[in-house]
Amino acid sequence: MAAIVHPQRVPAPAYAAPKPEATGLWSWLTTIDHKRIGILYGTSAIFFFLLGGLEALIIRTQLIRPENSLVSDQRYNELFTMHGTTMIFLAIMPMSAAFFNYIVPLQIGARDVAFPRLNAFSYWVFLAGGIILNLSWFFNMVPDTGWYGYAPLTSIMFSPADNVDFWALGIQVLGLASLAAAFNFIVTIINLRAPGMTMMRLPIFTWATLIVNVLIAMAFPAITIALALLSFDRFVGTSFFSAYNLVDGNLITTGGDPLLWQHLFWVFGHPEVYILVLPAFGIVSEIIPTFARKPLFGYAVMVYALAAIAFLGFGVWVHHMFTTGLGPTVDSVFAGTTMLIAIPTGVKILNWVATMWGGSMVFPTAMLFAIGLVSQFTIGGLSGVMHAVVPVDQQHNDSYFVVAHFHYVLFGGSIFAIFAGIYYWWPKISGHLLDERLGKMHFWLQFIGFNMTFFPMHFLGLAGMPRRYSSYGEESGWWFWNVVASIGAYLIAISILLFLYNVARSLRDSRRAGDNPWDAGTLEWAMSSPPPVYNFRDIPVVTHRDPLWAEKYGSHAVPADEGTLDVTLGGAKVGEADVADEDPGKQIEHRMDTDDTHDIHMPNPSFYPLVAALGIFLAALGLLVNNPWITFQLLSLPSLSVLGLLIMIFGIYGWSFEPAG
Amino acid sequence: MATAIELETSHGTGHGDDAGHGHAEHPPTSTGMDSRKLLMWAFLASDTMFFGALIATYMTYRGRSEELAVPPYPFDILDIPYTSISAFVLLMSSLTMVLALSAIQRGNYRGLRVWLLATALLGSIFVGGQYFEFTEFYHEGLTLQGNMFGGSFFILTGFHGTHVTIGIIWLMTLFVVSLRGGLSREKSMNVEIAGLYWHFVDIVWIVIFTLVYLIPYEEVENLAEPAAQGYLWLSTMASYAGSLIR
Ligand code: HEM
Ligand SMILES: [Cu+2]
C-alpha cells in the first residue's frame, strides 16, 4: 500500500486558475504566500543577526585589554543591551519564524497557513518593531538598561531620556507580531493537516512549532502587560515599579515594588528561552534521522518531552531571582522545579544519541551543525543545572559564568541549529545546494571560535568577573582569558563571512538541487525545489510518519501507527512505538507538475496587512518623537499616534471587507 | 486502509481569513472546527493570560495603600450596589448575544439586528457606567499616580472596559453589515465568533468584580500593624506551594 496516494483529486469547486507568480517590489509588499513571507523573515533576521554580531564584536574588542577605552561606559551599556535584545527578538525568533513559515505548511501538506493575510501582517509588524528599536541609534537615545530592563533603573528618575521608551515600545510591537503569528500557526497546525496526517504523524519540527507558538501565546502577555505598566510609569507617572512617586511636587511612598517587574519579566523570560530553543530542537530532530538514515528514536517520547519542557517552563522563573531575597522556601521550590526541567531535556538529548546509534551516518554540513547542537547545548544545560543550586547560583549570579551558560544554550543551541536548518532546507528554498567544502570550513571555524569565546567565560565567572561592566583592572588577572574570548569572537565573524560567501555563490550556481537531495522522509521534499506557489497539486493522503521513506523503502522501514509496541526504559514502559504491518509501498503516483492546476484556488495578494502594520509603526513612533511626558488627557496625545491608530483601523477594516479572492 | 474515508475529510485551500466574504462554504478542516473559531479560542486563551498578569498586579498591591496609609482607600471609594447594577447589565448582554446568534441561525435577520443592537446598547450602558464611576472616583481623589490602589484599579478595570468597547464596535459593525444585507444565515459563524469574545469579556468581569469589589478590604483601624514585608502576590503563592511540599 502506498504511503501517499493520489487516486482522486480532492474534490474542489471550479476555481479560477492561479495567476502566474508575480515579481517585483509590489508583489513582495503585498505577498501573502507563506514561502515568500518565510524568505522575508529569514533575510531580515540574517540582517539583524549581522547587526547584533557587529555589536558583539565591539564589546569583545573593548574587553580585549584592561582599562580599554574604545567605547564609553554609556556606549558599552547600549551595546550589550542592543546586542541581547537584537539577538533574541530580531535574530533568533524571526529566524525560527522563517522556518515555521516556509517549512510547516509544506510538512503538513497544506497550501498555505490558515490566515495568510494575518501572516503578512505579522511580518510587517515584526519589521516595524525592529526598525523602532534600531531608530534609537539615529536619535542617539539607545536602550541601555539590559535586555531584561530591571526596575527601577528604567524609571523616569534614573532614565529620563527616551532610551527606555524605544526599547519598551519596540519590544511591545515585536510582541504583537509574535502573538499574531502564534495564533496563526496554532490554527494552521491543528486545522490544515493533510488527510491522514494525524497529530502523532506530524513531523517533529511541526510539533516543536506548535508547542513554541502555544508558549508564545501564553508567555508574551506577561511581558506585554509588564511593558505597558512600565510605559504608564514613564508616560503617565504611575509607580508600578518604584516605591516612591512624585505627585504635585510631593514625594510619597506609594509602595510600588521593583520586584514585580522581575516577576512579570521572568514569568515571560523563562518560557522565552524555550521559545528560542525548542524550534532548534525541532530542526535537529528532522536532520539527525535523515543523516543517520533511520527514523527518529522514540518519536512519542520526544513529543511528550517537548510538551513537558514547555509546561514546566512556566514554573521555574524564580531561578533568575535567587539573589533577590525571596526566602529559602521559595528558592528551594524553584530550585526543585528547575532541576526537574532538566529531565525532559536530557531525554531529548539521549533520544538524539539513540537515533544516531547504529545508524548509517553521513556527515554533510547540516548534520555537523546538528551534532554541534547536541554537544554544545548539553554543556549549557549542565551549567544551567549547576545554577539551579541556590547557594551556587548566588556565586554565579551576574558573573560571566551566567554569560557562558546562556551562550552555550543560545548560540550552541539555537544558532547552531539555525545554521543546520539553513544548510538542510536551503536546497528546497533556493533550488541550489550550498557548497559542502565551504560549509564544513564554516562549521569548524564557528565551532572552534564559539568554544574559544565562551568556554573561558566559565573560568572568568568563577574568578569573579562581573557581567555588564565596561572594563576591568589589570590586577584582576582576567586579561588572558578575555583575549582568548575576543580572538574566538573574530573567528566566529570570519566563519559567518564564509557562510555569506557560500550563500552568494550558491545563488549564482547553475546546478539544481533536485526535489529531495538528502533523501529525507517528510512531505516538504515531495515537490519541486523551490515549490510552486500552491505547494501541492493534489493534497497528499498520509498514512505514515516520514511518508516519503515509507513510500520509497516500504513501510517496514517506517513505523506506522496501526499497531503499537511498548518502549521500555529500565523495565518500565515509557512510551509506545508503532509497528509496521504493511508491504513495501509503491512509488508516488505522480509528481507535482505545473500544468493541469486549473482547479487550485489561491488567495489574492493584499496590501492591507502592510497598511495596518504601518499604522502601528506610526502610532508607536508618535509616542517617541514628541518626547511626551504628557498628562493623561486624550487631546494632548501626540497627533502622529492618533494618525497611526486611524491608519491601523483603516487597514483592519479594509482587510476584513476585502474579498479573499 | 481507510483512505476513502480520509479523503472525505480532506480540504482544499483551507485558508480562513476571508471573514465570510469569500466563498460561502468553507473547506472542511482537520478537526471540523472552523479555523476562525479556533483562532478566537487561541486568542482568548492568550487574553486570559493578559488579564491574569493584570489581576496578579492588582492582587500584589491589594491592601498596599492601606498599609502605607496613602488614601483614598478602596472601602471609602467603591460603591458596590452601583457596580452590581452595571455588572448585572453586562451579564444580561450575554443573554441578548445568545439570542442574536440563535436568530441568525434560524434566518431571522430582523431578530438578529434587534438583539445585536440590544447587546451593544447594554454594553454601552456598562461602559458609560464605568466612565461615570471613574469620573466620580477621580473627584474623590483617586488617581493613577496617587497610590497603588488607584493605579492598579484604573489599569485593570480600564483594560476590561477597553475590551467591552472593542466588542461594541465589533457588534455595531456586524449590525451595519447585516443592514446592508451582508450577513446571511450561512455566515452565522461571524456572529458566533463575536459572541465568544463577548461572553469571555463578561466572564472576566465576574472575576474582576469579585476580586476588586466583593472581597472585603480590611479597614485601616483594623490593620494590626503595617506589614513590613512587601511580599508579592506571586511569590506568596509560591511560598504557599512550598509549605504544602514541606
Ligand atoms: C537544563 C535547562 C536549564 C536550566 C536548569 C537553566 C537554569 C538557569 C538559571 C538558574 C539561570 C539564572 C542564572 C543567574 O542569573 O544567576 C539561567 C540563566 C539564563 N538561562 Fe538558563 N537554564 C536552562 C536552559 C536554558 C535554555 C535552554 C536557555 C535558552 C535557550 C537558557 C537561557 C538562559 C538565559 C538567557 C539566562 C540569563 C538571563 C539573564 O540574566 O539575562 N537557559 N538559566
Ligand atoms: Cu530560566
Image (cartoon, rainbow, N blue to C red):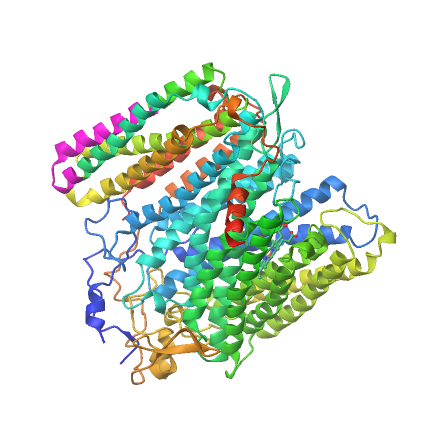
Q: Residue A635 magenta-drawn?
A: no
Across and down, in percent, residue A484 comes to 77, 62
Towards the viewer: A9 or B122? B122
Q: Which residue is drawn at 63% across and 45% down?
A: A82
Q: Quadrant of the C terminus of chain B?
A: bottom right
> Which x, y percent locates residue A583?
29, 85
Q: In this view, does A369 lie above or below A660?
A: below
**If the picture is divided into quarters, which one holds ligand 1?**
bottom right
The span shown in magenta is B102-127
> In the image, what residue occupies the spot 46% across and 30% down?
B155
Image height of A453 relative to B151, above or below: below
Q: Which residue is drawn at 19% across and 65% down?
A: B8
Q: Residue furthest top?
A: B139
- Chief SS of the magenta region: helix
- Percent coordinates x, y for residue A76 in the rendering: 72, 44
Total numbered labels: 0
Q: Is residue A47 left or right of residue A487?
A: left
Quarter-of-image position of residue A644 = top left
Please tell me which residue lies in front, A339 or A447: A339
| Residue A462 position by quadrant | bottom right
Q: Is residue A354 left or right of residue B1?
A: right
